[in-house]
């Protein structure tokens, strides 16, 4: 994947990670990487309408202190070429092309929301590819009421427009005092990168992704028992976009998975509770590192 010596840091913070491109499967993918070089990276799968600039740097940087992190734009989003696929299964195929283009035969995955749905499709189709899997703010194919995401999303986008706020403040967080504070802090963190920012998603691409999620929700459930590697599932207890009960559903469907539900929080529970969640995610994603290596870092 890289000529950088194994273990040497590529970069220390996501805000300074350079934009890169990689051509695979007829698509030019935009991506960023940081952290120590490893044979098995942690690939980040982003949410609906998300680009490279939508990852919380507090979580990415915490993981990158110990692991090689790679974040990428899906086809037709941000700096990647092509057209947004009409199904999440196709998006998983695109992700597979990107991963193989990196030269990886094994990866760990960190995913959020729509990214978790794509990661599930990837794991079902290529079960030997993923070693460790983090699924946050997401649910299974065919999950109850997931297809209602279109109405919820458009309503919250409207509310955000009326109040001149970022839609994520409504979509990701509760509207109580604590949720509003967490929302403002999260949105502010997303602006820490000040140069070479990614392109915002186009409206037509956003609508295509949203329809693809609804199709995913109406589909026949996948056999998630094929996911046998360690799996960490996390969410808030009041997720309006992907109902929190679906995190429990995932937990029941994936053998041996671990579930964390954060109180008084919504879809972005892991961002509201990043100070608690980031160390948990790091421990989970470094569990395969030799004890001596962990002590040295």
Image (cartoon, rainbow, N blue to C red):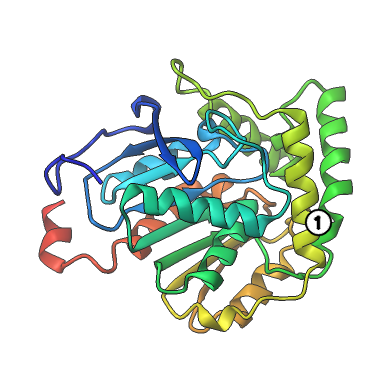
Q: Is residue 93 above or below residue 8?
A: below
Residue placed at 53% from the left, 38% from the top?
73
Q: Is residue 7 above or below residue 80?
A: below
Q: Is residue 229 left or right of residue 210?
A: left
Nearest to the observer: residue 84 or residue 118: 84
Residue placed at 88% from the left, 39% from the top?
155
Residue placed at 47% from the left, 37% from the top?
29
Find residue 90 and report its horizontal and vertical position in percent.
63, 55
Residue 183: quarter of image: top right
Q: Is residue 108 left or right of residue 115?
A: left
Res 175 seen here = no
Find residue 259 and report its horizontal and vertical position in percent.
55, 71
| Helix, strand or loop status at disc 1 | helix
User: How many residues crowd mark 1 within 10 Å: few (<14), some (14–19), many (20+)?
Assistant: many
Res 55 seen here = yes
Find residue 8 and report its horizontal and vertical position in percent.
14, 42
Identify residue for label 1: 214
Residue 92: quarter of image: bottom right
**In the image, farthest residue toward the top:** 195
Q: Is residue 139 above or below residue 8?
A: below
Find residue 237 and report its horizontal and vertical position in percent.
69, 61
Residue placed at 81% from the left, 43% from the top?
153
Q: Is residue 203 left or right of residue 2?
A: right
Nearest to the observer: residue 1 or residue 277: 1
Nearest to the observer: residue 240 or residue 33: 33
Q: Is residue 72 left or right of residue 18?
A: right
How many numbered marks appear? 1
């Amino acid at each position: 994947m890289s000529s950088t010596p194994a273990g040497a840091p590529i970069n220390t913070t996501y805000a300074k990670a350079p934009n890169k491109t990689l051509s695979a499967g007829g698509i030019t993918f935009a991506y960023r990487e940081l952290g120590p070089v490893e044979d098995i990276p942690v690939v980040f799968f982003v949410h609906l309408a998300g680009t490279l600039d939508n990852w919380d740097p507090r979580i990415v940087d915490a993981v990158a202190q110990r692991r090689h992190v790679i974040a990428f734009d899906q086809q037709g989003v941000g700096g990647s070429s092509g057209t947004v696929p009409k199904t999440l299964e196709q998006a998983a195929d695109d992700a597979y092309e990107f991963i193989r283009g990196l030269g990886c035969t094994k990866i760990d995955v960190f995913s959020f929301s729509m990214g978790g749905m794509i990661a599930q499709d990837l794991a079902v189709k290529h079960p030997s590819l993923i070693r460790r899997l983090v699924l946050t703010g997401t649910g299974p194919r065919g999950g109850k009421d997931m297809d209602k995401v279109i109405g919820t999303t458009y309503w919250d986008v409207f509310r955000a427009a009326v109040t001149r706020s970022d839609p994520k403040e409504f979509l990701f967080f509760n509207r109580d005092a604590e949720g509003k504070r967490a929302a403002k802090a999260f949105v502010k963190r997303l602006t820490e990168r000040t140069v070479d920012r990614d392109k915002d998603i186009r409206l037509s691409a956003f609508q295509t992704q949203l329809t693809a999620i609804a199709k995913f929700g109406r589909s026949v459930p996948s056999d998630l028992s094929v996911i046998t590697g360690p799996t960490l599932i996390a969410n808030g207890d009041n997720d309006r976009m992907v109902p929190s009960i679906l995190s429990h559903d995932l937990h029941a469907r994936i053998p041996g998975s671990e579930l964390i539900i954060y109180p008084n929080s919504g879809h972005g529970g892991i961002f509201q509770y990043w100070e608690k969640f980031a160390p948990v995610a790091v421990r989970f994603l470094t569990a395969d590192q030799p004890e001596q290596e962990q002590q040295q870092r």
